[in-house]
Each structure stands twice: as structure tokens, then as C-alpha cells.
Image: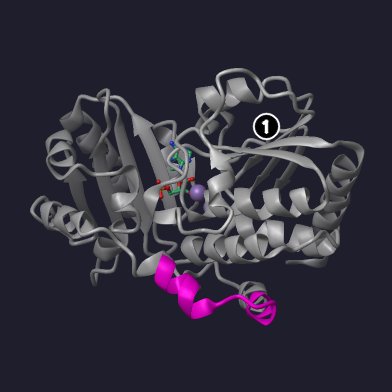
């Protein structure tokens, strides 16, 4: 972070401190189909605010996925209530666009008078009244850690563990290029504060249901690679999801397996969603292709090296269009 960036974030952090000081009720949300950074960020900030005596609601459109239910404090994250919550402030975490919070969540938060948007997606259009967006941060959880430390907010055990899960899952276990010295400093600080690093990693990464392997077998049967070997893709159709009784998070992270192939520059996962929509997940190995730019052509977004789209069909047309756009981006 440059000196200038530090100054701006310090200013925004103190604005957030003022919002916290002046209000007593908050609803904290994150994106649909939440990942570790989404739920981890909600729990991290939620428990810090609760420890300050604030009234805090944690809601997510899709609730907590089975794979993250081990997280202490995640039981406080519920699906949105039918009636709007009586809250002053709404906080969106790790959510690139407002609609990605989900319709029910937006309705539940509709009485909030002030919106805070904390995120690290480069494509975030700054839809809050206060926007703390740092696209150089590898995880929203890392922004929150700095925020909590800088404002000297409480850091209860749930927050400590949740920050770790958020940062670890969004950095591919502290591996991606977005990982910085500050990320390792954060890890070291959390361990000094009593984090059980062996246990939390085992809970996060060595605890998959068997059907995830069955899914992997099905995905491998659909694997395709472009003629030049630079684009690998695989797909999950509805029939397989039903056959294996899959949960949305069963495929989380599997795309990294095809991104890791020698020569592959971009990996794509096409998934048929209930109701005919298509979810496209893209990963880039390095700066040679910016998958966020490709995703934005189709109304999606994300980061330069990890981005996604939700689009309409027909299935084959969507595949052809996305693969062509990626091919073009790679040719540049
Ligand atoms: P995923 O492939 O779903 O793990 O998403 C990769 C990254 O892109 C994540 O940071 C997502 O938050 C972001 N992303 C995924 N889908 C969308 C979308 N439809 N619009 C904007 N950002 C997205
Ligand atoms: Mn996320
Ligand atoms: Mn994130």
C-alpha cells in the first residue's frame, strides 16, 4: 500500500468508526452462494460489533453452506426474514454488485438509512453511502482485520477464526499472487492470539463430503482443452447435480485443478443452475488474461484472476460465446 492509499483508507476507516459510534443496529450481508470470505467476513465484523454491545443481524440469501458450518459463530448467519428488519445501518461485505446480495436480503435490509459497502472486487461500482473498496486486498476479511485493528475494536475468538478462514480461502491458502507481507503478518498475529492453525485448516480443507469426489469424476468426463492448450473447461449439467444430490458449495475450488495444468492460462467452469440460468466461473493463471474484463462483457464481474457470470442460455450458445471472448482476450 502506498502512503497515499494508506491515508485514504485511514480516512475511510475513521468514517466507519463514526458510523459505528453513532448507530446501534446493523444488518450485515454478503453475496449469494457465499464462499469463505463472504461468511468469514460477516462473522468477523458481526462478532466485533456484538462485542461492542451493538444489535447485529447476520443474513445471507442462501444461508451458510455445509462446508462452512464448522465456523464458530456461523450459526448466527441466517437466511433473510420475510419482513424488513428494524435497523439503522446495512453493511454489504465481499459483494461486487448490490443485486448479488439477493432479493430477499435487499428486502430485509430495506429500512436501513445508511449503506456501507466493504469489498475488494475491482469491478465494484461503489453502491454504498460509505464505500471501503480496496482491490489490492486479497480478501474482504483482510480489509476488515485492518479496520478492526485500526479502530481498536474488540477481536473475539469468533472474529479471529473467521478472519483467518476468509483470508485463507480467498488466497488459495496464502498462495495466490494477491497475498502480501501484510497477509502473512495477519496470519502470524491471529496465531499469536490463539488461533489453532492445524485445526482450522483441517476443518476448512480436509472435511469434504464423498460426493465432492463423485462430482470431480463427472467433471473430468467433460473436460475440454483448446487446440493451443491455453483454455481448459468443464461443466456440470442439471442431471448430474440431481443424480449426486449436490450442494452448491460442493464444486467450490475444484476449478483450480484445471487452472493448474501446465500451459493452461484460463480455466472455465460452466454450471447449469435450477431455473435454466448458467453460472460461469473463470480463473486466470497470470496477467496474460484478465477474466474480470471478460466477465464484465456478459454482465458479470470479480477480480483480474477470478471472476464469474450469471447468464441466460441456451447452454451451447453461452459456452461458445464465453470461450470465444476468452480466446480473443488471450490473443491480444
Ligand atoms: P466464483 O467463480 O463464483 O468463485 O467467483 C469468482 C469471483 O468473481 C468472486 O470474487 C466472485 O465474488 C466474483 N463473481 C462471481 N460471479 C459474479 C457475478 N455474477 N457478478 C460479479 N462478480 C461475480
Ligand atoms: Mn466471495
Ligand atoms: Mn472475497
Look at the picture and state if 328 lies above or below 148.
above
Along the viewing direction, whichever of 305 and 146 lies nearer the viewer: 146
Magenta span dominant secondary structure: helix
x 12%, y 35%: residue: 239
Along the viewing direction, whichever of 67 and 118 lies nearer the viewer: 67
Along the viewing direction, whichever of 309 and 89 lies nearer the viewer: 89
Q: Is residue 201 visible?
A: yes
Residue extent of the magenta highlight: 188-203
x 19%, y 45%: residue: 235
Residue 130 in the figure: left or right of residue 301: right
| Residue neighbourhood size for the residue with mark 1, other residues' Cα within 10 Å, grouped as few (<14), some (14–19), many (≥20) | some
Across and down, in percent, residue 94 comes to: 58, 46
- The residue carrying mark 1 is 127
Q: Is residue 290 visible?
A: no
Residue 167 in the figure: left or right of residue 240: right
Q: Quadrant of residue 284?
A: bottom left
Quarter holding the N terminus is bottom right
- Label 1 SS: loop
Q: Is mark 1 within 8 Å of ligand 1?
A: no
x 62%, y 58%: residue: 141
Across and down, in percent, residue 55 comes to: 77, 39
Count of all numbered marks drawn on residues in the image = 1
Q: Is residue 78 magenta?
A: no
Amino acid at each position: 500500500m502506498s502512503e497515499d492509499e494508506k491515508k485514504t483508507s485511514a480516512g475511510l476507516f475513521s468514517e466507519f468508526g463514526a458510523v459505528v459510534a453513532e448507530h446501534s443496529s446493523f444488518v450485515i450481508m454478503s453475496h449469494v452462494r457465499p464462499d469463505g470470505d463472504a461468511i468469514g467476513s460477516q462473522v468477523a465484523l458481526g462478532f466485533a460489533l456484538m462485542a461492542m454491545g451493538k444489535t447485529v443481524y447476520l443474513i445471507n440469501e442462501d444461508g451458510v453452506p455445509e462446508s462452512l458450518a464448522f465456523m464458530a459463530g456461523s450459526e448466527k448467519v441466517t437466511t433473510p426474514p420475510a419482513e424488513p428488519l428494524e435497523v439503522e445501518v446495512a453493511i454489504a461485505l465481499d459483494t461486487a454488485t448490490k443485486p448479488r446480495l439477493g432479493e430477499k436480503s435487499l428486502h430485509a435490509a430495506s429500512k436501513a438509512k445508511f449503506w456501507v459497502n466493504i469489498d475488494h472486487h475491482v469491478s465494484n461500482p461503489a453502491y454504498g453511502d460509505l464505500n471501503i473498496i480496496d482491490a489490492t486486498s486479497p480478501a474482504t476479511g483482510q480489509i476488515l482485520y485492518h479496520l478492526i485493528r485500526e479502530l481498536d475494536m474488540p477481536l473475539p475468538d469468533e472474529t479471529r477464526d473467521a478472519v483467518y478462514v476468509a483470508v485463507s480461502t480467498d488466497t488459495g491458502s496464502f498462495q495466490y499472487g494477491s497475498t502480501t507481507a501484510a497477509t502473512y503478518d495477519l496470519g502470524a498475529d491471529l496465531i499469536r492470539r490463539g488461533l489453532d492453525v492445524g485445526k482450522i485448516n483441517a476443518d476448512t480443507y480436509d472435511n469434504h463430503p464423498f460426493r465432492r469426489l463423485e462430482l470431480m469424476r463427472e467433471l473430468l468426463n467433460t473436460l475440454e482443452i483448446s487446440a493451443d492448450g491455453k483454455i481448459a473447461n468443464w461443466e456440470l449439467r442439471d442431471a448430474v447435480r440431481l443424480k449426486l444430490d449436490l450442494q452448491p458449495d460442493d464444486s467450490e475450488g475444484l476449478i483450480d485443478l484445471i487452472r493448474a495444468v501446465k500451459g493452461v492460462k484460463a480455466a472455465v467452469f460452466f454450471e447449469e443452475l435450477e431455473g435454466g440460468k448458467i453460472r460461469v466461473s473463470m480463473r486466470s493463471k497470470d496477467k496474460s488474461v484478465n477474466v474480470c474484463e471478460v466477465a464484465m462483457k456478459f454482465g458479470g464481474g470479480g477480480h483480474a484472476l477470478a471472476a464469474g457470470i450469471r447468464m441466460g442460455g441456451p447452454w451451447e450458445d453461452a459456452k461458445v460465446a464465453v470461450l470465444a471472448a476468452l480466446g480473443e482476450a488471450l490473443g491480444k
